[in-house]
């Protein structure tokens, strides 16, 4: 699933179409039906963690709402750098933003309701003007081009993935959404204090959440405390903080937890910065056979009982698992 840095890049690209009218639609989505967006105006975009919000109005003169604090597409230190770079021109050239991944167009269940229990198939009710987009395992947004098959499917054909939604704008460009689930919402639900890429990310709340008597790799993926943090950030932050993924939160020393939160924020910001500079993501343990110190990396699936089991990479020498009764402190 795309993590916070990827979704913020999606937000940056979609923001280039703000102020334009949707003149043509397409895609396989049933809720919402693509036709319900035709002739609407894209008035605003917001981002929170792994979710993208797009505001549509029937009137071009509709007053845009002021987004919640911390909802900008990139953190403040990166905004100044981004302003010095060329602004994305939606008609200039095709861009893809899926980090080279592609997958089947539908990986999420087709239920009667939208994500987080949101329902609604049309903004016609008036109040529901925000389209909430939650990306699936290989979710992505493509600008001015469509995703193409990179390999044959199980049947041996090279069928291209089908977009869930395609929006053509009066400026001449278009957005294609893949592997996502969408629903109308009356507001852009954002809590910047929980977003790891927000300037208002609350370290105190994050540290408090890390005081639970459960494996630290479970807590890190809890979007209630670390919105935007996914499996890649989890693996990298734990390795850089020298913490075993199954270490109990409540037995980690304060300096160890501080270091972990530091690495979460720093790696996420570096990843996002690299996206805006066209650089590939650099990992030290994720998908690796050896860590930077030359030790063999282990891999296993961890997750709460009855919950999602996520593949985890760690180095048993750099991230030793200490006895449960022995508090773990920051290792040099």
Image: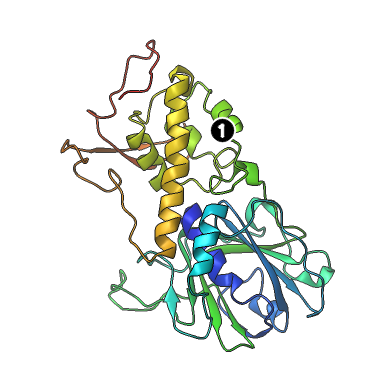
Front residue of 54/275: it is: 275
Name the residue rendered at 19%, 44% in the picture.
289
Q: Quadrant of the N terminus?
A: bottom left
Name the residue rendered at 46%, 50% in the picture.
269
From this view, report whether residue 147 is shown above or below residue 316: below
Quarter where residue 102 is shown = bottom left
Residue most extreme to the right: 126
Q: Which residue is labeled 1 in the image?
A: 206
Q: Where is residue 272 in the image (x, y as percent from the top left)?
A: 45, 56
From this view, report whether residue 244 is shown above or below residue 27: above
Circle 1 SS class: helix
Front residue of 150/157: it is: 150
Name the residue rendered at 50%, 33% in the picture.
219
What is the count of numbered marks?
1
Residue most extreme to the top: 325
Q: Can residue 318 be seen in this view?
A: yes
From this view, report whether residue 156 is shown above or below residue 229: below
Name the residue rendered at 78%, 63% in the picture.
65
Q: Position of residue 80 (x, y in %)?
A: 54, 60
Q: Can residue 109 be seen in this view?
A: no
Q: Position of residue 281 (x, y in %)?
A: 34, 56
Front residue of 252/224: it is: 252
Q: Where is residue 310 in the image (x, y as percent from the top left)?
A: 39, 42
Q: In which quarter of the image is the C terminus?
A: top left
Q: In this view, does 31 lie to the left or right of 62?
A: left
Q: Is residue 30 left or right of residue 292?
A: right
Label 1, residues with CA under 10 Å away: few <14, some 14-19, many ≥20: many
> In this figure, which colouring scheme has been used for the structure?
rainbow
């Amino acid at each position: 699933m795309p993590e916070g840095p990827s979704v913020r890049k999606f937000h940056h690209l979609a923001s280039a179409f703000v102020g334009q009218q949707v003149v043509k639609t397409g895609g396989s989505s049933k809720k919402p039906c693509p036709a319900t967006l035709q002739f609407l105006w894209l008035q605003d975009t917001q981002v929170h963690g792994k979710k993208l919000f797009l505001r549509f109005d029937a009137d071009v003169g509709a007053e845009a709402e002021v987004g919640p604090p911390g909802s900008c597409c990139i953190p403040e230190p990166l905004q100044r750098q981004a302003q010095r770079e060329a602004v994305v021109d939606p008609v200039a050239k095709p861009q893809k933003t899926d980090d080279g991944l592609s997958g089947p167009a539908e990986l999420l269940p087709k239920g009667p309701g939208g994500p987080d229990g949101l329902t609604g198939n049309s903004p016609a009710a008036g109040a529901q003007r925000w389209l909430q987009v939650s990306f699936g395992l290989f979710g992505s947004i493509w600008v001015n081009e469509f995703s193409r098959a990179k390999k044959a499917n199980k049947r041996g054909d090279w069928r291209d993935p089908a977009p869930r939604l395609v929006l053509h704008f009066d400026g001449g460009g278009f957005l294609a959404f893949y592997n996502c689930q969408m629903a109308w919402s009356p507001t852009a639900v954002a809590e910047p204090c929980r977003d790891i890429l927000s300037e208002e990310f609350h370290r105190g709340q994050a540290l408090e959440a890390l005081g639970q008597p459960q494996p630290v790799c479970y807590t890190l993926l809890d979007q209630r405390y670390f919105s935007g943090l996914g499996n890649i950030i989890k693996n990298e932050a734990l390795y850089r903080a020298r913490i075993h993924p199954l270490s109990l939160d409540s037995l980690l020393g304060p300096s160890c937890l501080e270091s972990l939160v530091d690495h979460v924020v720093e790696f996420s910001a570096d990843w996002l910065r690299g996206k805006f500079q066209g650089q590939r993501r650099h990992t030290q343990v994720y998908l690796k056979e050896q860590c930077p110190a030359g030790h063999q990396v282990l891999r296993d699936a961890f997750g709460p009982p009855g919950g999602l089991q996520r593949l985890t990479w760690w180095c048993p020498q750099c991230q030793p698992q200490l006895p449960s009764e022995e508090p773990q402190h920051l290792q040099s």
